[in-house]
Amino acid sequence: MAMRPRAALALSLAAGVPLVLLLLLLAPGARADDGSGGCGAAGGGEAAPGDRARARALKIAAFFSILVCGALGCCLPVLGRRVPALRPDRDVFFLIKAFAAGVILATGFIHILPDAFEKLTSDCLSGGPWQDFPFAGLGAMVGAIGTLVVDTVATGYFTRVHFKDSAAAAVGAAAVGDEEKQQQQAASAPHVDDGADGDGHGHGGHVHMHTHATHGHSHGASALVAAVGGAEGDKEHALRHRVIAQVLELGIVVHSVIIGISLGASQDPSTIKPLVVALSFHQMFEGMGLGGCIVQAKFKLRSIVTMVLFFCLTTPVGIVVGVGISSVYDEDSPTALVVEGVLNSVAAGILVYMALVDLLAEDFMNPRVQSRGKLQLGINASMLVGAGLMSMLAKWA
């Protein structure tokens, strides 16, 4: 299982680093596109000195607020393993996870997807095909389908690799155990003369062969359980949640980079102020959803630390990058509109798929939930509250 921390780190880096580098490379292009009529006329450097000072203070507050809220949300389920009421097999865990899934669902539908439509249908893109086709819907569909493909392929791959390794370990352990038992039986069996009855000898050989096969099966099953660290069904469940956690982090990282850079590049305090509250709120509960998947995936400590740190730092680092390129980055330029719109639409598709399929459906169809009407009602209400509160924030951000 040594490949798991590396896989988590590789996926996280593959998700975040190219996005940051891409937007950094496109920043000069966004400045270069600034000469088309009214589009991009209100650049970042046009704000009054007083507004820039207030915007800078709000960005510093946003950096620490989003960092702390993200860390708190992501670490709460992880640290909750030591609190009996917050363990994955308790009702409170299902309620919190449903609330977080509702927040993620509303983030995709209410915040990210409409923003993608707005950017990809902007009047500044009138020179291309953007007004004639719903590219934001296409991007969301591609994101959802791509997530489905990654979800199924990764789950199948990890299951096959795990089964192959476990089967090899079980066969090896069974062979060693059978050889030892055969030697013990040979040493303790009574001596039979070579001239003894052939049927008796043959019957004894038959009994030994039957015992050998039965022992091999029993020992193999025990070795399989020992190799995976639990029951076979539990291990498959953990593997499934490992894929869910990593794909969910991929979707979160995509839009976290964008919103961080957009916030950092903005010079309007009236725009930044509601964003700080909205982003802190949704970062906390996105973190709870991700942290819940991390707990159920039973990652090793190194993988947990890697994923939590990457989630917590993505938006704050995006804010820092946005501050650094605010003098050259114009969010109304055609290049910036296309890049942000496409990435936002894909991120919306990823988050909607993950919220509905891998978070809500996974828990709503859980036998524990299905067998208890009160818990079923509770998680439905919790999901609606999370989605409702996140939807309300769309009025301000």
Image (cartoon, grey):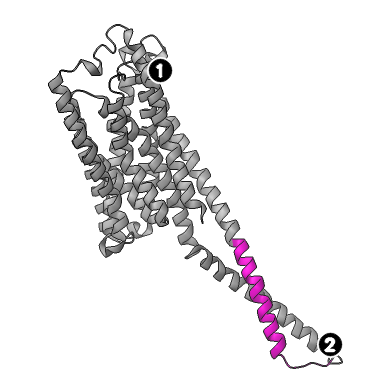
Q: Residue flagged by tag 1: what amino acid is it?
A: Phe
Residue 245 image offset from top left, x and y in percent: 40, 47
Name the residue tied to disc 1.
133
Label number found at residue 333: none
- Front one among 53 and 67: 53
Which residue lies at the image location 55% right of the left edge and 71% below the top edge?
Answer: 222
Say few, some or many: other residues with alpha carbon within 10 Å of mark 1 (under 14 / 14 to 19 / 20 or more). few
- Give the structural element (helix, strand or loop) at label 2: helix
The correct choice, above or below, for 39 with respect to 175 in the image is above
Residue 388, given in percent of the width and then of the height, sits at: 22, 39
- The answer to whether 211 appears left or right of 280 in the picture is right
How many labels sit on residues? 2
Amino acid type, residue under disc 2 in the picture: Gly
For mark 2, what is the residue?
198
Number of other residues with Cα within 10 Å of mark 2, as a class: few under 14, some 14 to 19, many 20 or more? few
The residue under the point 30% across, 46% down is 287
Give residue 93's position: percent from left, percent from top.
29, 56
C-alpha separation, residue under disc 2 versus residue under disc 1: 85 Å
Magenta stretch encompasses residue 192 = yes
Earlier along the polypeptide chain: callout 2 or callout 1? 1
**Element at badge 1?**
loop
The residue lying at 45 percent from left, 56 percent from top is: 237
Q: Is residue 230 left or right of residue 74?
A: right
Magenta highlight range: 167-193
Front-most of 260 and 238?
A: 260
Residue 184 place in picture, x, y as percent: 67, 85
